[in-house]
Amino acid sequence: MSRPVSKLELIAFADGELSPARAAEVEAFLSTNPSLRAEIDSLRTLRSQAARTLRAEPQNPLLRQRVEALFDEPATSQPPTAHLVLPLAKRRWWASPKLAIAAAVMISLGVASWVILAPEGESGVAQGDRGELLIEFRDGRPPDGMPASMILVAVRKHLTCQQMSDHFYDSRFPRVLAELATPAAAFLGADPSLPDLSTIGYHFAGAGGCRITGGETLHALYRSDSPASEGISVFVQPFKGQVSFEAGQILVLAGPTSKHQMLAWRTESLLFYVVGDELAATERTAELMGQRL
Amino acid sequence: MVNLSLRRNEPYDTAAMSDLSNDQAMPCASFRALALAQFDSLYRMAYHLAGNRTQADDLVQETFLRALKAQLQFELRPAGIRPWLFQILTNIWRNDRRARSVESLAGDDAANLPADEEIVGSVAKLADLDWDLVDGDLKQSVHDLPDPLRECFLLFAIEQMKYREIAEVLELPIGTVMSRLARARKQLVVALTASTSLPRAHARAPLQTGEVDA
């Protein structure tokens, strides 16, 4: 033994705080002191019994859901995050139960902090927090059957994740498209058949799971080979009645000159929405996923 | 964005880092995954600090709100995200208690370290405890610890944190952590051995301190 064992070292030994070399020396010392060994064992038992007893307390799954929702809201430190601008003459949100509900949902979720009404005749658009246009709606307003909050969150998510590094880091999903089918099907309850977009110049950048408006969502991101700043996001959710349009119908949300594009459709079991920065690529993605525009 | 500032040759928490690569930026999915992985632990800690679910709910929600607001300043260290989140939680807890002028701990410094030695002598009494019978007593005894001792012991026992981690979370010198742990354990031993569950006739003799070098 390199030096005598102090009382403090015995406690540190019991707590697993000694270096391996010194712990081995203390272990050897204790082998010749059974009563002392028993004391150390009692110290460890107190810790392990306290852990066993105190870890058994119930959890709060509802709180967990609320906290998860906090993470799925855009940029909490920079409200307001998005605005829905609706033409006054075409749409009065207080007169429309669907839009009133959508506004209430947005406010309650903190997704869009406020809804403003644009001067008469202006097109309906969704704006980012710096006033940039996210989507210019094709019909001057969000389409019936899809909550505005889902549109805003999807476009924000597309832009935010695209600006980050090359990949998602969700360990549940592989970074290789060919390996994605099985974990994606397990996550969603059905195979989403995510497309290979290499034929249109986009490569698979990664997939991640998140809980956003509409429920658990698989977000697959594709990046343009050139320019790299452009991307396509495919969002897939288990269909649980969160939209009211029919299976087989395809919604074209943005007008042709919109800065970002968005298409949505659903099957009996899955809801898809594709967000892209370029019209032709977004439409081609839908076609590669079996949709006819 | 979160900066990864791992130093070379420094050990790190592989579990906490398992879904990270060498890229410089951490996407939202990673911060989310790392933070939410600590939810159960934070909730347990909050519950045992507060003693009721309502306050625990508030504590945990506020912890995650502040973490989200501060995520741009968060720097991922070798120990992972855990100490940072627990530090936020315990700071909220302490500020709340301070605002309500709740107890402080007298004589709380490394000078009290000899208390550590006493614990070795008294702990022998635990050897004959039937732990299943004192389950409720143990829970109550932990709850009855003064706040500074309880927060230290909870991190040590439930979260199995090292002295260094506890010191980081509670922003204390390691000596103070050791002192608080010793005092907490001593108080628990006294409480548990005073319970009727202990067959006192079988209690063992205290440690013969002459067997070790002081």
Image (spheres, coloured by chain):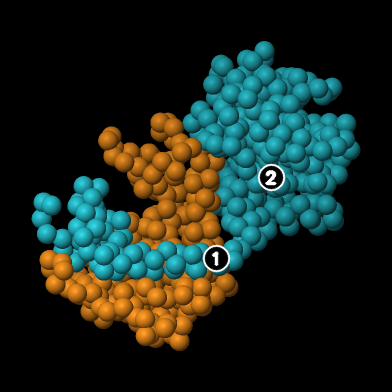
Chain colours: A cyan, B orange
Tally of numbered tags = 2
Image position of B89 (left or right of A207): left
Q: Nearer the viewer, residue A113 or B183?
A: B183
Which quadrant would the C terminus of chain A be assigned to in this image? top right
Question: Vertically, is A17 above or below B20?
Answer: below
Q: Residue at x 60, y 48 (%)?
A: A72
Question: Vertically, is A238 above or below A259?
Answer: below
Considering the numbered disc 2 on the image, is that residue within a helix, a strand or a loop?
Answer: strand
Q: Where is residue B11, by image quadrant?
A: top left
Image position of B137 (left or right of A185): left
Image position of B64 (left or right of A239): left
Image position of A216 (left or right of A267): left
Q: Which mark is residue A216?
A: 2
Depth check, mark 2 against mark 1: the one in front is 1
Q: Residue at x 25, y 78 (%)?
A: B206
User: Residue A196 location in percent, x, y?
Assistant: 67, 19
Which residue position holds label 1? A56
Q: Distance of mark 2 from mark 1, alpha carbons?
A: 28 Å
Query: The residue marked by circle 1 belongs to what chain?
Result: A
Judged from this view, the residue extending furthest toward the top is: A199
Q: Check disc 2 and give the amino acid type.
A: Glu
Q: Is residue A181 visible?
A: yes
Query: The residue marked by circle 2 belongs to what chain?
Result: A
Q: Earlier in the sequence, mark 2 or mark 1?
A: 1
